[in-house]
Amino acid sequence: MKTTTTGTRERIVRATSRLLQRQGYEGTGIKQISREAEATLGSVYHFFPGGKQELAAAAIRHGDQEFAELLREGLDSAADPAEAVTACTRLLAEALRASDWQDGCPITTTALETVGRAPVIEEAVTAAFAHWRAVVEEKLHGSGIGLTDARELAATVINTLEGAELAAQVARSEEPLHLTGRHLARLIDTYRPPRTAPAFTTAAPAVP
Amino acid sequence: MKTTTTGTRERIVRATSRLLQRQGYEGTGIKQISREAEATLGSVYHFFPGGKQELAAAAIRHGDQEFAELLREGLDSAADPAEAVTACTRLLAEALRASDWQDGCPITTTALETVGRAPVIEEAVTAAFAHWRAVVEEKLHGSGIGLTDARELAATVINTLEGAELAAQVARSEEPLHLTGRHLARLIDTYRPPRTAPAFTTAAPAVP
DNA sequence: TCCTGGATAGAGCGTTCGTTCTAGTCGCCT
DNA sequence: AGGCGACTAGAACGAACGCTCTATCCAGGA
């Protein structure tokens, strides 16, 4: 009973998550979800009697975990917090390119479409952002950055990653993400214990 | 002939722009647009024979101009580039609060929904982002920052504003935008001519 | 062996979608 | 005066929407 049950439910959640990521909330139909998940409409409403909104909220929570794992993977790949953040931008850029620029942040589109009009979804979105900020904050604070600075920086890191991912998707290029990695690293470096702060470099002026 | 023509056309574009901003592309119907613009369906298709996509592209171009004006207003309000950018975050925060957190960036939602599947819209989106980056770049370069640095910083400023506006909308708070203003100012300061660089401050550690 | 309840299956409801199409109104030019 | 093109008006189309509902399947306990 449990294998089949969780099997179908999970297939539905995963399909929903991917479709919301690529087409947004209004652009994704329940019938398309059931088709993609190889489940019937009856099964979808059996597991999600709250309909499309409940389904979307579950998918957002799934995307939350997925994105958090990617963040953790990037952050764990380097001891230095600035390097760790650029590792995240590198991972995001690779994933984006690998999906032919289709798979951006799994929740942003849905979040924007439903903000202020679907409380169940908004709740999941708010929780996801808080979760991601906490993951980054932990890394920064653990690297010797003060608690308040770490918390504030974490918020900016997440926000900037969101913006850069959008830009990269639109431009079909990894460059916005890599540039963001460099700038975030530079910003983080200004919060380091003073004796280890590196000298800043400035790009050479264009020679005409 | 001209007054009536441009009158109706403009009403349609404006209504579309506002609706796309608040509800996204898929969440906005053409009939709703014609109702809101006080125009008939016939008029809508008369001015936009390309249908919903052409209409959305025109609305995106409208939002492009609108957002660029806000940017210019903020950037012109201070000579110092870092202060100028925080002025932008302040303006954005005020506008967002004034609309009860409804009016975020006028094109982001539509951009995300249609990326990779509606070339006419994508073109307008790409142009808008390039336009905004150019506006910021001009200000930064005009403040003594090197051309390459200014261009790169401008891209990050725009991306970060986008991310912060999303966060502010979700959190129903001006704080993400204000915080972003501070961090962007700090980042910009690291690119200043060396003799004027201010000493960085670090938030006081929490006292338990 | 039969029963029960979770799970599957999909037809069908009323509504709305984007678009097309025909009819009619109005102001200007000849 | 007459006609022409720009614009307005909205009915109607097939398709798709979210959701409800009944019927059926099937493994596990009594």
Image: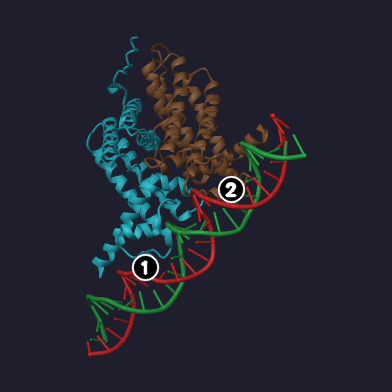
Chain colours: A cyan, B brown, C red, D green
In depth, the one of A51 and B98 nearer the eye is: A51
Q: Secondary structure at mark 2?
A: helix
In depth, the one of C2 and A36 nearer the eye is: A36
Asked whether the beta carbons under mark 2 and mark 1 sit within 8 Å of each other, the answer is no
Q: Which of the chains bears the disc numbered 2? A: B
- The vertical placement of A173 against A104, above or below, is above
Circle 2 sits on which residue?
B41
Location of the N terminus of chain A by quadrant is bottom left
Of the two numbered discs 2 and 1 in the rendering, the one whose residue sits closer to the viewer: 2
Q: Secondary structure at mark 1?
A: helix
The x and y percentages for residue B24 are: 48, 45
Circle 1 sits on which residue?
A42
In depth, the one of B32 and A168 nearer the eye is: B32
Q: Residue at x 53, y 30 (%)?
A: B65
Q: Which of the chains bears the disc numbered 1? A: A
Q: Are marks 2 and 1 on the same chain?
A: no
